[in-house]
Structure formats: structure tokens, C-alpha cells
Amino acid sequence: MRYRNLIFILLTLTLFHCQGPGNNNYTENEDIARKVDSLLNLMTLEEKIGQMTQYSGTMAETGPSVGNADRVAEIESGRVGSMLNITGPDATRKAQELALRSRLKIPMLFGYDVIHGFRTIFPIPLGEAASFDLDAIESSARVAAVEASAAGVHWTFAPMVDIARDPRWGRIMEGAGEDPYYGAQVAGARVKGFQGDDLSDPATVIACAKHYVAYGAAESGKDYNTVDMSRMRLFNVYLPPFKAALNAHVRTFMNSFNDFDGVPATGNTYLIRNILKGRWDFNGFVVSDYNSVAEMVPHGFAADQKDAAKKAVIAGCDMEMVSGTYQLFLPELVRSGEINENLIDDAVRRILTVKYELGLFDDPFKYCNPAREKSVTLSQEHKEIAENVAKRSIVLLKNENKTLPLSKDTRTIAVIGPLADSQIDMNGEWFGRGRPEDVKTLLASLRERYADHVNILYARGCDVNSTDKSKFGIAMSIARQADVVIAAVGESWAMTGEAHSRSSLELPGVQLDLLKLLQSTGKPIVVTLMNGRPLSIRWVKDNVPAILECWFLGTAAGDAITDVLFGDYNPSGKLPVSFPYSVGQVPVFYNHRNTGRPVDPDVRWTSKYIDIPNDPLFPFGFGLSYTSFEYKNLQISAEKIKKSDSLNISMDVTNTGEVGGEEVVQLYIRDLVASITRPVLELKGFHKIRLEPGDTRNIKFTIHPRDLGFYNNNLEFLVEPGTFKVFVGSSSGDIRLQGQFDLQ
Ligand code: GLC
């Protein structure tokens, strides 16, 4: 017996401390699994539960205060496996040193919300999604990972992959919009950007698919609100981006605050154990959202915090963010037999596995690198990448009388509006370690690049959200002197993001009054809209000749917008989300079902309003260009295909304008008859292409029968025979070519 123990201890020490050179000799699962099991066998129950416990530092406030007590003693005794909201090589080193004083010296994980950049800030994710450029989106996440990892961050709580069809919900700014197919593409690109190809590379961070699941369907657009939908809709609309993140090897999921089927996601065994860890065989770990374990008590699902801890662990929530109920109650729940220690061991294995994958046991301080932080943070290269992503995210919503691009001979420009020179607003919400002073605003960029030969006049005109019209006069006086007015209007950074839902989608404050006054001067107006959610800008669309959707574009906002205003970059963005005609339409989205009485404006007895149109103000996939594109010669490789076949679809796209530009060629299908009602349109592919004037390119798509499948109300994934329409176009509302085929 003694001999065997000696072998066991020697083996454990060898495995536990072998200096795998950057993990490249890991046979990933075997080596890591062995080390994890060896370590697990050495751990006390309290130490195991410590790994399942995460507390918040004080460098950011990302939720209600839950008493940021001093955690030093707990960390030193191995009772804290992770901290969030601690960043910087020095601060994370200090915290890690505390963890390494513990008996088993298990390093902590440092998590932080790196949502659209760490210090170099990129467009808000909804804006980035408008680029329809997966390489650009991946490059943004890559830069964020390089900067965050140099600042001691191991783990970003991103990508947020929640499908959102309700712009009242403030967190619509964090995701990729309304479409499951596109949301899945973006999810994969962002996970790849954050995690890279080798997690042991210190310039990578583990990603977190959040918020699992259906958080964006909160009733009435109120954050944290009840979510109720069919499981069929869950599988067909809200789960696909999470599945894509899992297929991209995302290492963590974060459960959402909402309930689903009446059960809070944090304690929802169906969502976590049945789907995520069961059907999908996810082998990473699930972290709760901020305090969401304890919040199962106000949900009315847990009787008290002990009950909440029990239900969360049983459901498969591996790590508890900040509420501390695991540390308080799991020891007695296990010792009393109410919780089987196997559940604890499974959670701890998952967490330790990720720590080994990062290489933290080899070098717990590998992310604490001041020299690397200094060399990569806000580098010129990163700022250039940010400007590229930003300009590609801008969407041209209207351009009457060729108002844009502005002539470089323009003599006088009046720049007016509360967002023309607001550095803080350009970073949007979830700005990480971004600093307002790093931002170049639109006014700053125009002055820097054109003041030597253009008279740039500026007036704020009004606030974003006040009733004060006292500065209208000054604005009007400079507008009258100008050849063109650029009106920078929209929302403030804090009007979207978490716990920032709005009941209205109108321009806040008196901005619309200001625009109407400016329009009365007769000067051409260009609206540069800066906002975190779709807005119902009806009057602007009807009365202003040129509109650019600029979102919150981050550090390089000013230069990106200036590039587009003067035609140095031909805008190429497309809307990833519908812009409602009014909040009364919400939820409004392109991939809706047809109903038995589809809208007919001339027939009363059809599905419509008596006071507004059914169509949104701007549809999903919409975006104009300074040039024009013609689509012709649609070729569909077969009229009929079997389930073992695939179908090739091609078309010619020509730049019929006078300047080079990019087009996002969109492929949609419609399943005409199925065992459940299907959407009138479903995006199944897109290509963003650049064409010079007169160029024609043959664009190809391939459809596999699986792409036509759907989950029915028994949650069976079906690929049914039938006739499918094919639509190709410049947006969901601008179909240029159509055809059809039969699946046998
Ligand atoms: C917040 C958010 C979540 C974030 C977490 C940590 O409440 O819901 O998205 O990652 O807490 O800051």
C-alpha cells in the first residue's frame, strides 16, 4: 500500500508540475485530463468549491453591489478560482501571488468584459456586424485579445451572441442583430479572433458565449424580463449562434438572467445539461451571470440562497459569479448528501481543464507582462485596424441628389449636433479600458484633415437628451453660412447597453426640432446618426437628403466618418437589424412567417395596421453605396436535387456606377410548404465583394439540403422535400433575381 501511495504521489507531482513547453506536447485531452484528475484527487471539498467561485474586483462596476468584501484571505486559502474586473499586469500579478500562497497553488482566472475592444475601441458589436465582413470582425476580436491578454486578462465575457429583434432592449448594441444565420457566422468569427488557434499562446483569451439563452427576447424589451417562447423558436432562432460558438471551440458559456419555460437560465437543467452539455457535448464550463444564482430567489424559483446554490449546481452552472452561495452552502449540501460530490468534481474538472489549456499552471504570470502591454496597447497598427473596421461598419441609408460624397472643394461646412465632438459617446457602452481622450471625434477629424482649405464651423446646437433649445440660434447662424450642414445626432453612449432599455425609438430630446430648423435653411443636410439601437427616424428619412448610420465607432470614429463623407471610402455596410417605422411595430424582423392573411394594403381583412405600414423603415440587409450594382444571369445548377446532392447558385454582379465599391450579395431562400410554417425569407449566404466601375464578377453559392432544415415542434431536425424559392439581392427588401428548385 505504501509503495502504491509513493508511486501515486510521485506520478501526481510529475504530472502536476511538468513544464510542458507551451502545451505543444499536450495530447490535449489525455495529458490535461490526467493532470486535472491528479490535482482533483488532492483537493479538499472547500478547495474544489473555491474553483467554482468567482468574485469581482473594484476596477469596474458591472452589476448591483454585492459587497466587494476584501477577498484576500479567501484567495490565499484557495477559496476563489477566478476574479473579474481586475486588469493590468501589476494588479493581476498581485492577485495571482495571493492565489499561489494557497496549499495547492492553483492559479486564478481573470475575466473581464472585452466586448468591442480593450483599450483600442472598435465599433459596438451591432455596428461591427453591419460590416458584413467576417475577416474585419475577427480582426477586431484579435486586437482586443492581444491588448487584453497583455493587461493580465485571461478570459473575455464575449462574444454576446443573443439574437435581438426588439430595439427597445438596450443590449441590442452588444450583438449581431436579428438573423440566426448571420449571428452564427459572427459568433464563430469572434470566438476565433479571441481564442486564436492555440489557447496556450499568451496573446489569446478564452471566450464566453453569452447570454445563454434567449435573453434578447425579454418581454416588452425590458432588460432581465421574462422570456417565453416555443422550444421550436428557441432551436430555430436563438440557439444557432450559440451552437456556432461551440463549433468554434468556445471554452465557456455564460447563462442569462432571464427565465425560460418558467425556469431561470441559471438553474435550467434542460438548457444546460440536456442541450448544452448533453446534445451538444460541451466540455468547457458555464459561468453564471452577475449574481444570477442568488437572483433565483427573487425569481421565485429558489426558496433561499442555499436552495439557489443547489439548483444552480444541479442544473450544471459550474462557476458562480459574485453571489457567493456556492462557497457558503455547497459544503454542507454535499456533506448532507443533498448534492452528489460528482457534480462538484465535474464542474471543477471543466474549470481546471481550461486553466491548463491556457498554460496557467506552467506559468501563472504569463499574462502579466508590462513590456508587452506597453508595446501593443493602442498601437498605430491597432488604430489602423480599428479605422478599417469602423469605416466598413458605416451604412449609407439615404443619398438623394448625390449629396454625398462631399466635394473636396466644399468651401464651408457647418458641423452641428451634440455628437459631433463628443469623445465619450463614440466609445459606446461596454468600452472596456477605452478612454475618451483616445477618441478622434468627427469634428476633430474634419478640422485635422480639411481645415487648411475648408471653413469648418461648429455648433453643438443642443444636448442629446434635454429640452434646452437655447443654442439653436447659434447653430442656425453657422448653418446659413455653410454650403452643407453635417448634423451629428443620435443617442448618448449610456442610452444602450445593460439595464438601458427605452420605450421610445425616436431621436431623444430636441434633436429633431433642431434638424427641422436646419432643414428650413434650405441647405443640404447630411445626418451622421450615432446610436446603439435602431431608431425610427421617419422624418429624417423623408426630409433629409443624406443619412449615414455611424453607430458608435470607437477610437477611430472621426476618421472613419470623414473617409466616407468625402468618398475616400465608399460606404459598404448593411443593416444587421431592421429599423422599425415606429416602436409600435416591434418586434419587426425580415424573417417573419406569412400568416394566413398576409398583408395587402388594399384588403381590410389582412394582417396589418390601420395607421402605419407593415414594412420597417429600413429592412435587414439594407445599405446603399456611392456606386450602383446590377445583378443578372442567375444560374441554379438543377431544378430538382436529392438529399444527397448540393445545389450551386451563381449570378453575375456588375458595378454599373462611376466609382469602385463593395456590395454584400445576399442569398435568401423560402420554403414554400413545410410541416410547420416557415419564414418568408431566410438568409443562407452572403459575399462581400469589391468591384471597380464596369467590373463584373460571377458570384457562387452552394446550398446543401441540411441548410434547408429546421426544428419542428417535436424538436426533430427535419429536411423536408418540397419547393424552395431562391432570392438574391442587395437587401432583404431589394431582391434582384429569383428562381426556384425542388428538394426530393
Ligand atoms: C453583467 C452582464 C454580463 C457581464 C457580467 C460581468 O451583468 O450581464 O454580460 O459579462 O455582468 O461583468
Image: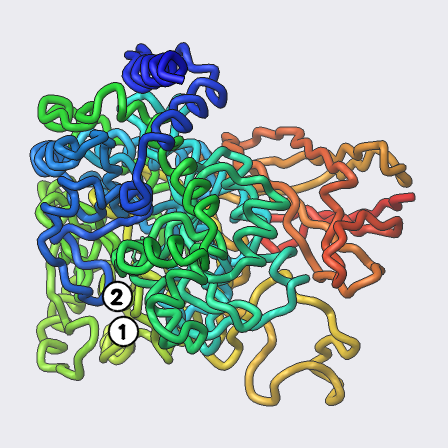
Q: Secondary structure at mark 2?
A: strand
Q: Secondary structure at mark 1?
A: helix
Residue type at tag 2: Val
Residue 595, which numbered label? none
Residue at (30, 12) in percent of width and height:
18
Task: Estimate the x, y position of residue 119 in percent, counting from the top left.
Answer: 18, 40
Q: Taking 408 as reference, is 394 left or right?
A: right
Residue type beneath disc 1: Leu
Quarter of the picture holding the N terminus: top left
Asked if 278 appears above or below 162 in the picture, the reply is: above
Q: Is residue 255 left or right of residue 488?
A: right
In the picture, measured across the screen, residue 530 lies left or right of residue 34, that is: left
Q: Quadrant of residue 509?
A: bottom left
Q: Position of residue 303 (x, y in %)?
A: 40, 75
At a point 83% along the width and 47% down the height, the residue shown is 740
Q: Quadrant of residue 680 in the image?
A: bottom right
Q: Which residue is mark 2?
A: 489
Q: Considering only vertical position in the picture, is 496 above or below 297?
A: above
Q: Earlier in the sequence, mark 1 or mark 2?
A: 2
Q: Is residue 233 above or below residue 641?
A: below
Which residue is found at the position 16% from the left and 54% from the top?
A: 60
Which numbered mark, 1 or 2, is in the foreground of this view? 2
**Display coloring:** rainbow
Which numbered dot is residue 515?
A: 1
Q: Nearer the viewer, residue 196 or 415?
A: 196
**In the rendered view of the protein, which quadrant contains the C terminus?**
top right
